[in-house]
Image: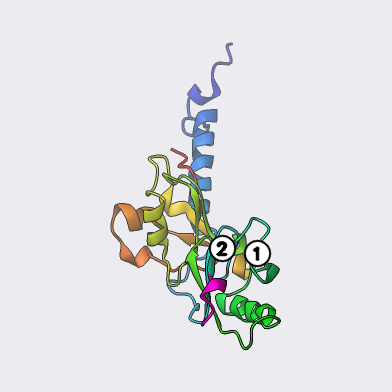
Amino acid sequence: MPVGNAASRPGRTGRFFSVQSLAGLALVLLSGCASTSHPAAPVTVANDDYSYIIGAGDNLNIQVWRNPELSMSVPVRPDGKIAAPLVDEMVVQGKTSVQVAREVEKQLGKYVRDPIVTVIVTGFIGPYSEQIRVVGEAAKPQFLPYKQKMTVLDVMIAVGGLTDFAAGNSATILRTAEGNKQYSVRLKDLIKRGDVSANVEMRPGDILIIPQSLF
């Protein structure tokens, strides 16, 4: 007697699944887990005391009061240092503009009486630890300098939105400032459906990860 296909035996319909069906079910389960495995990102974050940190590639405008010949605009080199007249090579990466101004005053004080220095950052890149990175299914994945009160909507506008293959509601924020804790964000709801309740604030060093849709 021929054995036949198990799925077609009388009385056993529905008790067997094809390999394709099982694979499809697994994908659905994985998709569901991806969107619920992390807590929702908080709408606001406490960054009221944030001060911009200088990074390699920034440009600094150094003004020395009553000494225009010592005032200058200098780039921050890839090693995080600047060099200027009467100022030895100085590490500025990772410092605020006020901290750099005080250090320049200290060095100029060897040659100028009571120098008063103001440092203004005119080109903003910031150190790697402060940058916002966008990876995955963004139209233009890239890094962005962090700005006070920056939101995920600001970030998505800067990177050109989602690709056609993005699983926007399965996106996550990897928050390095909180020991690489991950939060879920609903980018599809925010961008495609205009749900502003899905907009959340970013923190310096955040990494926005946008996965590819499984379907």
Most foreground residue, 161 or 107: 107
125 up-or-down from 178: above or below: above
Q: Nearer the viewer, residue 170 or 50?
A: 50
- Can residue 18 be seen in this snapshot? no
Residue 110 counted in the magenta span: no
Q: Residue at x 32, y 65 (%)?
A: 196
Q: Secondary structure at mark 2?
A: strand
| Residue on which the image places disc 2 | 74
Task: Point out residue 34 in the picture as x, y percentages from the top left corner.
Answer: 52, 52
In the foreground, 19 or 8: 19
Q: Residue at x 66, y 79 (%)?
A: 108
Residues shaded magenta: 65-71
First-in-chain label (1 vs 2): 2
Whether residue 201 is visible here, answered yes or no, is: yes
Q: Horizontally, is 134 left or right of 197 in the view?
A: right
Residue 4 place in picture, x, y as percent: 55, 16
Which element carries disc 1, helix, strand or loop? strand
10 Å neighbourhood of mark 2: few (<14), some, or many (≥20)?
some
Tell me the tag on residue 83.
1
Quadrant location of the C terminus in the rendered image: top left
Q: Residues within 10 Å of mark 1 (few under 14, many from 20)?
A: some
The CA span between labels 1 and 2 is 8 Å
